[in-house]
Amino acid sequence: MLNCRDVSVLVSQSLDRKLTIWQKMNLWMHLSMCKLCSRFRRDIVHLDSEARHLVHESQRDGLDKDITLSAEARERLVRNLSSQQ
Amino acid sequence: MEVQADTPKRDVDPAAWVSLHGDSLYRYAMSRLRNAEVAEEVVQETFVSALRHTSQYSGKGSEGAWLMGILKRKIVDHFRRNAKSGLQIDSGEGQDITEILFDETGSWRAEYRRNDFRPLDSLEREEFWQALRTCLEGLPNRQSDAFTLRTLEELSTEEISKELEITASTVWVLLHRARTRLANCMRSRW
């Protein structure tokens, strides 16, 4: 029987590789009985999908609009590029 | 006279390039690297590389997308250089998060059995994004690099393993620790 720490490892790995059929069965058996691990799984899965989603959105809709090059940085970039031409 | 192998198709105005694409490239780099100096450096490498290879730009897609493609490669190169330099290995992994969360039998410790944690999917997108950025900064470098490459750059475990020259099992360990720490940090902010 897997303990909660083992389950946290498998929950994370399930996002990166195909688990074996035995690992899947053991995982689901544990999750069906353990509220804390189910909560952990829900958080980890959401973390993964929402981070992927928001990193795309941040480019488009201004989630990171406050992040811009400073005037000095802009100047450094132009100067450096001009010297390379 | 030396013949240029890579003759530019058109003149490039550096000021116009920086003005048109600088912020979006910088924003992208910052979301992955979280360090203004490093992000600027990578954007600079991107522009310089693009300038040297302007003939490779077919003109079919947008110029911004072409530059973004170069930037993505530069970001992965940056992580690879860091991994190779060994600096990050010495920076330590911090305390093993699993020792904080689980007892010696592998069960959740009492303080993590509470029911008043706010689930991550109840966070509004702005708060989620801010919390993720802040908590990523608090991760040991190797863990945040692995998480960034896997989740934000969407590289496979095999690709990360190849780029960082570490085994796939090490990538899984880093990702497990990164995700567990992030979830814990993001929850504890509310």
Image (cartoon, coloured by chain):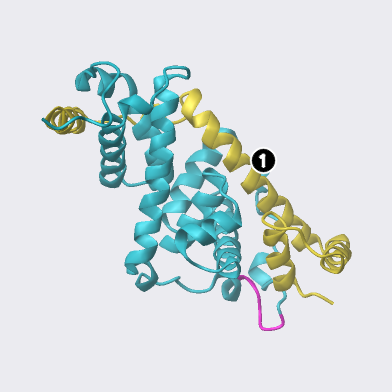
Location of residue B5 by image quarter: top left
In the image, residue B190 lies at what x, y percent?
56, 48
Relative depth, front residue between A18 and A25: A18
Q: Residue visible at 43% across and 57% down?
A: B138
Instruction: Give the chain coloured yellow.
Output: A
Q: Which region shows up in magenta?
A: B101-105
Q: Amino acid at mark 1?
A: Ser
In the image, residue A28 lies at what x, y percent?
86, 61
Q: Residue visible at 24% across and 17% down?
A: B16
Q: Is residue B85 left or right of residue B138?
A: left
Is residue A33 one of those drawn in magenta? no
**Count of labels in the image:** 1
Relative depth, front residue between B140 and B22: B22
Given the image, what chain letter belongs to the residue carrying mark 1? B
Q: Residues within 10 Å of mark 1 (few under 14, many from 20)?
A: few
Overall secondary structure of the magenta stretch?
loop
Q: Is residue B85 left or right of residue B64?
A: left
Residue lying at the far front of the rendered structure: B1
Picture layout, residue B86 above or below residue B66 = below
In the image, residue A38 lies at what x, y percent?
78, 57
Check the rendered structure and report the hue given to chain B: cyan
> Does dot 1 land on a helix, a strand or a loop?
helix
Q: Residue visible at 57% across and 60% down?
A: B175
In the image, residue B185 lies at what x, y percent?
53, 56
Q: Residue visible at 30% across and 18% down?
A: B9
Residue identified by numbered label 1: B122
Q: Is residue B65 left or right of residue B84?
A: right
Location of residue B182 by image quarter: bottom right
